[in-house]
Image: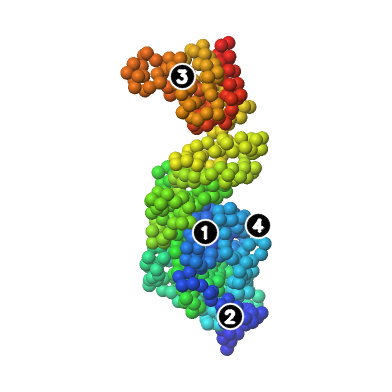
Amino acid sequence: MADYNDLAELLFPDVKETIDDLEKKYPPRNLVEGAQVTRFAPSPTGFLHTGSLFTALIGHTIAKQSGGVFYFRLEDTDTKRTIEGSGKDLVDQLAVFGVSADEGWFPEGDKGNYGPYRQSERKQIYRTVIKELIRRGRAYPDFCTPEDLEAIRKVQEANKALPGYYGKYARDRNLTVDEQIERINAGTPWVIRYKSNGDHDKKTKFVDAIRGEIELQDNDIDMVILKSDGLPTYHFAHVCDDHFMHTTLITRGEEWIPSTPAHLDMFRALGWKAPKYAHLPVIMKLDHGNKRKLSKRKDAEAAVSYFLEAGYPPEGLLTYLMSIANSNFEEWMIATKDYDYHHFKFSMKKMSLDGALFDMDKLNYFSKELLAKENVESLEPKVKEWASVHSLVLFEKINRDESYFKKILNIERERKNPRKDYAKYSDIEPLTRFFYADEYAKLVEQGLPFNERYEKAFLASLLKDFASSLPFGVDEPTWFASVKDVATKHGYAISNKDYKENPDAFVGNISDAAEVLRVALTCSTQSPNLHEVIEILGKEEVEKRLLSLASSFEK
Ligand code: GLU
């Protein structure tokens, strides 16, 4: 009578290595006390999802803050979903965010001693482990066709039983080794299933590093671990990989919680110590009052590329994601005035569990804070690089006169309360259009928002006076004194008190006069510091704009 050894040899004749050999090849890592080995293990099925960046950021932060290792593993066993080139895109996008792995799969080749880091190149490792499971009677070949499985499903439906390949519904679970060998020799196609010892009426408990103790129904499904294409399923592959790569903490999405009992069961069957699991909350979105998962199909912001294209600084998005991760982050940031999330001590215990809501306003807030604090020398090259790919209009303007553009970008910067008007690089071009003569002319043509109460002749004379009286190259108080002089001459009150006491005696107050100047030069009632604007535009351009408007009002 044949035994499990015979079956294992028949199924995997070429596998000569043993699990022991693999243990020697991948010895424990030399780590300092408390160091965590985490990983980002995406499937190359498309773009970097915002939720995946969140997962990578948490894994990276935990590894870095504990003096450990963060590695990248490409989980490409689902060949039908694999998209060519997506592995490289994922690595490149992580690099843009500075969440790069210390070791792992890279487009130019593996880095590290625990590879290969691409699952499709690890076939022999999985086959070695499965051969051992077969020897131990903990895995078996299943010969069911899709039609057989469908028939089982129908019976289960009729019996009101739970779906799945388990217990008495696991048709090939109890075939004798002789029967198995006979079918294999007859060329019947097979897959390999894990033989679960679980009991659905019992519970499995485990401690999640974020959520604490979790109790779930035991797994009793005989999961497929090796598919007919010779590749393993995720469930089994991650068990082998996280074991031989010596992961200490698996940070993954909460959608994997239900299968964790099965994963732990496999670790036990192999006699391996399972790593800790930390199941991260998914990022949600408020949609017509209902909370739902950020969707790849429906939401542009589900793809990280959306933020890069809009010109959000990568640190803006990361800082925002860190604020979702730990509820005390923002408090820390305000208290320490430290806007670098790397300095924040992340804690798994402080992670919110009820599905963080993605909030664009909050992202804009963090982004504005970061952009406002950056000096122009470091900011300008980033804007230029972004513009070279995403905004040729802005790129052309930067190239026209880079030092002029820098002056514009530097308005109200490097001071105690810097101006916070840009949340993303794409906000810059529309807000600075008026600085460019050709764009200014177009804006004037569209009409200027002067207060309607002014007569044309009045505006013409006021603008002409401004043109001839305002000094250049002086400090702001000196300049403003001249603005006041001109305003007084034209009937404006220069003190608010005077104006309030007797509004009918004046054309308006001093801010109304400044508004006329602002509208004339910037085509808007809102602009950055007018004195800085005037200095950047320069005497010639300012006079040209004021006089040409004045003469248009005189016609
Ligand atoms: N490849 C799995 C996924 O993309 C990874 C889950 C894990 O990190 O273990 O969902």
Q: CA distance from mark 3 to mark 1?
A: 60 Å
Q: Are marks 3 and 1 in contact (CB under 8 Å)?
A: no
- Occupied quadrant, residue 140: bottom right
- Please state the horizontal and vertical placement of residue 187, each as a whole percent of the image: 65, 75
Q: Amino acid at mark 1?
A: Ala
Q: In what element is the residue under mark 3?
A: helix
Asked whether, in this view, residue 63 is left or right of residue 111, the answer is: left
**Numbered mark located on residue 24 in the image:** 2
Q: Give the mark, 3 or 1, whose residue is nearer the N terminus.
A: 1
Please state which of the two labelled residues, at mark 3 or mark 1, is closer to the viewer: 3
Per the rendering, the mark at residue 84 is: 4
Q: Nearer the viewer, residue 356 or 418?
A: 418
Q: Secondary structure at mark 1?
A: helix
Q: Which quadrant does the C terminus fall into? A: top right
Element carrying mark 2: helix
For mark 3, what is the residue? 485
The residue beneath circle 1 is 56
Give coordinates of residue 167: x percent, y percent: 46, 73
Give whichever of discs 3 and 2 has the lower sequence position: 2
Q: Residue furthest left?
A: 501
Query: Which quadrant holds the N terminus?
Result: bottom right
CA distance for labels 2 and 4: 34 Å
How crowded pointer 1 is (Cα within 10 Å; few <14, some 14-19, many 20+) is rated as many
Residue at (60% x, 65% y) in the render:
104
